[in-house]
């Protein structure tokens, strides 16, 4: 029988590498504009560092991983129940355990409904996880864009690039403003998980 295993989206797997290392809050980027000789003022942000050090990313990674694990456990449990039902049906069929053909067909139909229900559950859980991931991506983009809008009022960069992997073949370190962006984002971020914990503690009082 085909096992129903839950497959998390690529986005979640990409986020699962979050670590606890954070930049020092007093770190400042090099004067990127000075190297541009008064022409185009350019900077870049390391996406990998942003994903692993921005508290918003770290917390949402935990949330999405928990949802993914819960969904996978649910599907595996339901899948095992279906497999047991199918094995039981086959054994009874082989041992002439059904009182009539109608009884065997009724149980077979019940198993088919169980299988259909499992397929629908899998689709629903995957859709819910995809929606949560999209919500996360939208939230990350909004928070970053709003911060850069405020940040750049003083910095006056003409262009801020995202650097991830080899999408930029070469960039001098003096153009790197990643730590500055992460520091600013973390200072402005209000923890979702901490707010939920605080809310639950207040409800217990």
Image (cartoon, rainbow, N blue to C red):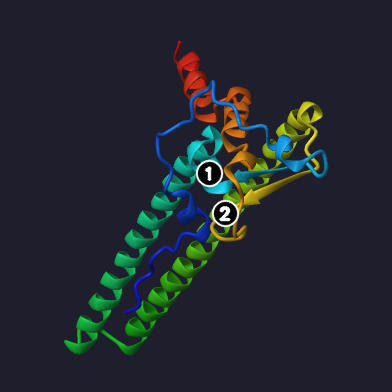
Q: Quadrant of the N terminus?
A: bottom left
Pick the front one: 13 or 3: 13
Pick the front one: 173 or 152: 173
User: In the drawing, does residue 24 fall left or right of residue 134?
Assistant: left
Q: Residue at x 59, y 24 (%)?
A: 190
User: In the drawing, does residue 163 fall left or right of residue 93?
Assistant: right
Return the x and y of residue 70 as percentages of the image width and height. Answer: 40, 50
Return the x and y of residue 156 as percentages of the image width and height. Answer: 80, 33
Residues under numbered marks 2 and 1 in contact, where contact means CB atoms less than 8 Å apart: no
Q: Residue furthest front?
A: 37
The tag earlier along the polypeptide, 2 or 1, is 1
Pick the front one: 29 or 112: 29
Is residue 153 positioned above or below 52 on the image? above
Q: Quadrant of residue 66?
A: top left
Q: Which residue is mark 1?
A: 51
Return the x and y of residue 170 as percentages of the image width and height. Answer: 60, 56
| Secondary element type, mark 1 | helix
Q: Residue at x 48, y 64 (%)?
A: 122
Of discs 2 and 1, which sits in the foreground? Answer: 2
Q: Residue at x 67, y 46 (%)?
A: 138
Neighbor class of circle 2 (other Cα within 10 Å; few <14, some 14-19, many 20+) is some
- What number is the disc on residue 90? none
Return the x and y of residue 20 as percentages of the image width and height. Answer: 40, 34
Is residue 204 positioned above or below 175 on the image? above
Q: Which residue is mark 2?
A: 164
| Secondary element type, mark 2 | loop
Mark 2 and mark 1: span between their CA atoms? 11 Å
């Amino acid at each position: 029988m085909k096992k129903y295993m839950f497959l998390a989206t690529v986005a979640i797997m990409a986020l699962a590498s979050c670590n606890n290392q954070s930049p020092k809050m007093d770190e400042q980027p090099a004067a990127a504009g000075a190297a541009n000789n008064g022409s185009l003022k350019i900077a870049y942000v390391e996406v990998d560092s942003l994903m692993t050090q921005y508290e918003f990313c770290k917390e949402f990674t935990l949330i999405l991983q928990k949802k993914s694990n819960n969904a996978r456990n649910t599907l595996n449990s339901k899948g095992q129940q279906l497999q047991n039902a199918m094995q039981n049906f086959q054994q009874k069929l082989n041992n002439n355990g059904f009182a009539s053909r109608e009884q065997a067909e009724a149980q077979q139909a019940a198993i088919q409904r169980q299988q259909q229900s499992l397929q629908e559950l899998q689709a629903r859980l995957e859709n819910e996880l995809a929606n949560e991931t999209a919500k996360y991506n939208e939230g990350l983009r909004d928070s970053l864009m709003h911060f850069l809008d405020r940040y750049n009022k003083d910095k006056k960069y003409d262009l801020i690039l995202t650097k991830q992997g080899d999408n930029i073949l070469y960039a001098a370190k003096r153009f790197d403003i990643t730590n500055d962006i992460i520091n600013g984002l973390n200072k402005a971020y209000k923890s979702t998980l901490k707010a939920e914990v605080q809310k639950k503690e207040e409800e217990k009082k």
